[in-house]
Amino acid sequence: MSSPSSKQGAPLASEKRETFSSRKLFILSAVGSAVGLGNIWRFPYVAYENGGGAFLIPYLVAILCAGIPLLFLDYSIGHRYRGSAPLAYRRANRKTEMLGWWQVLICFIIAIYYAAIIAWAAMYCWFSITKAWDKNPEGASGFFMQDFLKVSDDVNVSFDFVGNIFTPMLIVWLVAIVIMVAGVNKGISRANAIFMPLLIVMFAILVVQSVFLPGAIDGLNAFFTPDFEALQNPAVWAAAFGHIFFSLSVAFGIMVTYSSYMKRKSDLTGSGYVVAFANSSFELLAGIGVFAALGFMAHNAGSSVDEVATSGIGLAFIAFPTIVSQAPLGGLIGVLFFGSLVFAGLTSLISILEVIVAAFQDKLGWKRTPATLVVVVPVAIISLILFPTTTGLYLLDTMDAFVNQFGILACALVLVIVFGAGLGMLPKLAKHMNRHSSIKLGTGWKVLVGGIGPAALGYMLINEVQSKINESYSGYPLWFNGIFGWGMAGLLIVGALVLSLIPWSKNSKADDPEFKEHQQNVEAEELPEPAGKEY
């Protein structure tokens, strides 16, 4: 590889591609990405609303028939083609590079608002000690909307900054930048090795404390009591597939990128099963903790659990503060809950940022530090301009809804169709997975990815399109949803196309000798047919 001239000003990508130093660190990082805010504040309510204990049946079916197979698709592409999402897809077929950039831009949108939620959770750790929301006549709801976020009555874009949000957001971004600059092993691996055990320990203590609260048994009964009639409703099955799909970080480009850092002789399917079931185990733990606390809240209010059960921002920043104010050792419950949100959010945020950094690092041929600074600092600046404002909540709500449904879902649908029916690459990818994996992939995996995957994704996408067309999202003005919802989703596709048309730098990883050697070794080791236990 030739050296860049001084005019180019780009640092030379002289070092070899980083790898996770051990399989354990890859698994920790992958679980850290998968276990995010949704596991804590979304899964319990989704399960409760869709059959309670009976929901575990479609949930398990969704894991085995869609979640894990699509997770393996990401692993196989990233590990075989040894690159960030755009580079891996480009190496698979030059026409598919755009899919990688689509995922990069999706991660860009998620990153800019995800940092805001982490900052909110960090502030609420302190508020849990002081019980700051008790001073507002309207309680936790009034405090969150009026005193903390200072939400404007006008759904618009304002640059009226809120200081107690801007400062923690700035700290979140500084922490993220330090971790990203440090690299895969010294940064991402080390951060996950610290944050994940802390998250598990803190949440386990929270669960134990919650289940001994008065009324906790009522909450657990509401969560686990099965409603088997709900299984006759197609919407319940769609909810299970939709939740698993987002929960495992499938089609974000994250698992493609992370698997590219795995060593050549890695047990990919074994690692995938560990990641998938560790993620699900945490979700069940979250369900127990959250509904035990909601049972206490209902007990204190003299109401039923269904009257206090909620999800998302309402659960985290309105329901839980109410519990903190009423429960014995409530301050500790608050610190544990919101601290868990901070750690879960940080491990997910660094995985999202890694998709973006790795893509530009591969395309420009830059070293880690300059690539990180050139990419992450502008992302942080945009985030700090848009979200610590009096209209930040409206932007966050709209962008989150549309990037998830019309970014990730649409991109995933195109991905499985292109790699399945379009390019017919599933047999080749299965062979790659079977080289060193403990569980071999065969016809069943190809049918699930090429058949069940597109059917489930297509059904969910059509439902979401109909829902958003029939009714303005959250009642926001049409122009607002048009720009920050539909417009943003469309711009991601246009931006991905533009980025895919930009020529790769001479110093890029596009023609990396290290990859050519990797491919030769891969092709020499591939098994002709699956052997042993088959998926």
Image (spheres, helix red, strand yellow):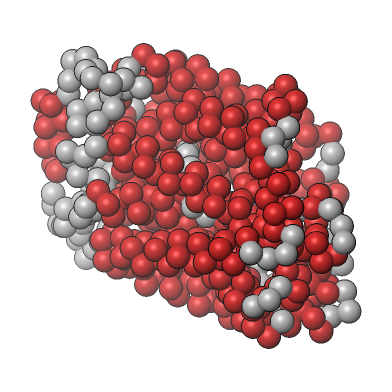
Quick one: 23 or 408, which is closer to the camera? 23
Quick one: 304 or 36, which is closer to the camera? 304
Up the image or down, 218 lies above or below 138; here it is above
Residue 281, horizontal then vertical, whole percent: 48, 46
Q: How many marks?
A: 0
Q: Judge left or right: residue 3 versus residue 54.
A: left
Quick one: 12 or 17, which is closer to the camera? 17
Q: Judge left or right: residue 200 versus residue 263.
A: right
Q: Is residue 74 visible?
A: no
**Where the C terminus falls, by quadrant?**
top left
Residue 388, horizontal then vertical, whole percent: 66, 72
Look at 60% across and 76% down and name the residue there. Answer: 332
Q: Is residue 204 visible?
A: yes
Q: Quadrant of residue 237?
A: top right
Up the image or down, 50 lies above or below 473; here it is above
Q: Judge left or right: residue 510 versus residue 72.
A: left
Look at 23% across and 19% down and name the residue there. Answer: 532
